[in-house]
Image (cartoon, rainbow, N blue to C red):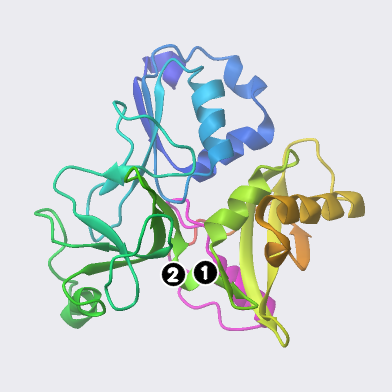
């Protein structure tokens, strides 16, 4: 489509970029992408490997891969890396004009740079939703959990230059032996392994550690699941994130359950593992 219509701006999801990584750059390079100036990405945390693939292979460093974060309730991007800003792989970017974002603890106290906590908006925006049809109390609760803030439900960290990294949903954060591990960090470490195209991580009950980590991986084209590869993946995560983040199990799968907007449905994987009801699957892609 880029070659045929001379597309200059494209909006996509990290899951699409990881799909391109899975099948290899030869499927990209046979098309003319010279008109493509901006490749915007949202829907899931954009891991550094996928960003580099988009910037260096799809765009050939002639355009900009720009990350951004928003929600249905917010109706437009609130964090992002504008083309005029230096990109930081792994970081979504800075608050966009009019947005007052912060990272706070459960009491609403601002946290120092480098400390993970709840991502909040300190003031409303003109284009935000005002209520939810037939359920106003639900939307109102987003503003009451942390006084004076809109709680996004995501965990984030902000660095000293004001760049935010969104680490994943608060209910997706794993608690292993008292250590909080973001699924985005874990999945980013997995995708940096040369054999892995996509990955999902969940926590399962463990009598000793509270939770143990099970990961589901989709391999790149031409890679085969073996015991040796499984051990290599475990060692790779251990090297990238430390012993506490070492997966207890690695499952090789053909695809991951996702919403139509590209978000991985980790709760569905967890429910299937524990034999629990799957809940609402109306947004499931397939």
Residue tagged 2: 170
Query: In 3D space, how far apart are the residues under numbered discs 2 and 1 (Cα atoms)?
Result: 6 Å
**Which of 251/172 is in front?**
172
Residue 123 image point, x, y percent: 14, 61
Residue 89 image point, x, y percent: 48, 38
Rendered view: 193 above or below 37: below
Which residue lies at the image location 69% right of the left edge and 67% below the top edge?
A: 244
Quadrant into which the N terminus falls: top left
Which residue lies at the image location 31% right of the left edge and 46% below the top edge?
A: 162
Residue 263 in sight in this render: yes
Q: Secondary structure at mark 1?
A: loop
Residue 253 in sight in this render: no
Disc 2 vs disc 1: Cβ atoms closer than 8 Å?
yes
**Which of 108/224 is in front?**
108
Callout 1: 10 Å neighbours few (<14), some, many (20+)? Answer: many
Furthest residue toward left: 126
Residue 62 image point, x, y percent: 43, 15
Q: Which residues are magenta?
A: 258-282
The numbered dot on residue 173 is 1
* Snapshot quadrant of residue 26: top right
Direction from residue 116 to residue 139 in the image, left or right: left
Is residue 87 in the magenta section? no
């Amino acid at each position: 489509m880029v070659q045929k219509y001379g597309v200059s701006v494209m909006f996509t999801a990290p899951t699409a970029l990881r799909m391109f990584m899975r099948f290899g750059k030869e499927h990209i390079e046979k098309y003319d992408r010279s008109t493509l100036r901006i490749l915007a990405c949202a829907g899931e945390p954009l891991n550094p490997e996928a960003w580099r693939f988009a910037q260096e292979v799809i765009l050939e460093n002639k355009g900009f891969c720009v990350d951004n974060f928003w929600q249905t309730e917010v109706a437009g991007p609130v964090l992002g890396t504008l083309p005029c800003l230096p990109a930081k792989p792994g970081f979504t970017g800075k608050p966009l004009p009019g947005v007052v974002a912060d990272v706070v603890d459960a009491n609403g106290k601002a946290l120092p740079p480098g400390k993970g906590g709840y991502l909040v908006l300190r003031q409303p925006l003109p284009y935000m939703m005002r209520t939810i049809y037939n359920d106003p109390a639900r939307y109102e609760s987003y503003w009451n959990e942390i006084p004076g803030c809109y709680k996004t439900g995501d965990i984030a960290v902000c660095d000293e230059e004001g760049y935010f990294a969104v680490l994943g949903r608060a209910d997706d954060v794993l608690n292993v032996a008292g250590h909080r591990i973001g699924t985005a960090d874990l999945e980013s470490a997995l995708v940096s392994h040369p054999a892995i195209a996509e990955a999902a991580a969940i926590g399962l009950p463990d009598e000793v550690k509270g939770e143990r980590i099970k990961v589901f991986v989709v391999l790149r084209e031409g890679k085969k699941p073996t015991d040796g590869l499984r051990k290599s993946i475990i060692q790779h995560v251990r090297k990238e994130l430390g012993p506490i983040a070492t997966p207890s199990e690695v499952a090789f799968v053909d695809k991951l359950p996702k919403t139509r907007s590209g978000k991985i449905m980790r709760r569905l994987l967890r429910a299937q593992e524990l034999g629990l009801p799957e809940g609402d699957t109306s947004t499931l892609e397939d």
